[in-house]
Amino acid sequence: MRYQRYGKISSIIYSWLIDPLLWPLRPRIARLCRKHGVNNVLDIGTATGAQCRTLGAAGIHAVGLDLSQTMVDAARARPVQNVSFVVGSAYELPFEDSTFDAALLSLALHEHSEEERNRMLMEAMRIIEPSGYLILAEYSRPPKTLIHIPWRIIQLIENLAGPEHKAGFHQFIAMDGLRGLLRRHGLQPIEVVHSHFHTLTIAVVRRHSTLESSAQSEVA
């Protein structure tokens, strides 16, 4: 699987480069969880656990999951109250149905193929309780990309991340990023928040509304 390539060097890059760059995203997600009454979150593809630590500091119980043992070891090296980490696959989450108030996929989808994204979303939905939330934080192409310096930096980082990662990113953006993903899955966010000069978008989706939409489609 793709995550197996994330070893010691990747964990260092995340800790010293990626985590600082993504820092403004972390408190925004924590505030959204607090706002919607989320108390128990699964962070899928947690990497070094930075988002989980922010959630834990906000009084939210968080479990971070990653397939890379090295990433999980790096996350566990900085223990925080309310937070735990497990090794596991986003394709087969090691949890029972309806275990969490919310599932978070933060920059965990774009590097994958469309089939893999679909599997990850289905698993995320499975472990959310019916009244819970799916929280997605992903790239969306900003307007005027030719003169958009933050977007150019993101493209550079993604292009250097390896051929599979690069291919997934460019396919994801060609399919209209997070906006396109939401449309393809019929997901209607109850709240949308932009970050990083509109290059990143956070979408909050109620699971019960998604279930209702699916049921209505089946009846029709």
Image (cartoon, grey):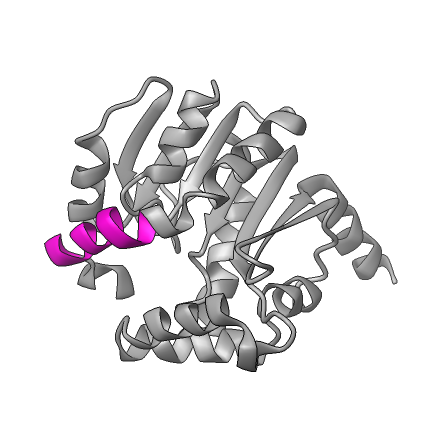
* Quadrant in the picture for residue 186: bottom right
Q: Nearer the viewer, residue 43 or 185?
A: 43
User: For this view, does 188 lie left or right of residue 196?
Assistant: right
Q: Nearer the viewer, residue 142 or 176?
A: 142
Residue 85 in the image: state x and y as whole percent: 29, 33
Could you tell me which residue is drawn at 21 percent across and 32 percent down? 76
Q: Nearer the viewer, residue 98 or 196?
A: 196
Q: Main secondary structure of the magenta part?
A: helix
The question of residue 108 being in magenta is answered with no
Quarter occupied by the C terminus: bottom right
Residue 84 in the image: state x and y as whole percent: 31, 27
**Residue closest to the far left:** 8
Q: Is residue 67 above or below residue 162?
A: above
Q: Is residue 82 above or below residue 154?
A: above
User: For this view, does 125 lie left or right of residue 63?
Assistant: right
Q: Is residue 172 visible in the rendered structure shown here?
A: yes
Could you tell me which residue is drawn at 48 percent across and 70 percent down? 149
Q: Is residue 1 visible in the rendered structure shown here?
A: no
Residue 39 in the image: state x and y as whole percent: 54, 23
Residue 124 in the image: state x and y as whole percent: 51, 47
The question of residue 17 being in magenta is answered with yes
Could you tell me which residue is drawn at 61 percent across and 69 percent down? 142
Could you tell me which residue is drawn at 75 percent across and 44 percent down? 190
Specify the segment rendered in magenta.
7-19
Quarter occupied by the N terminus: bottom left
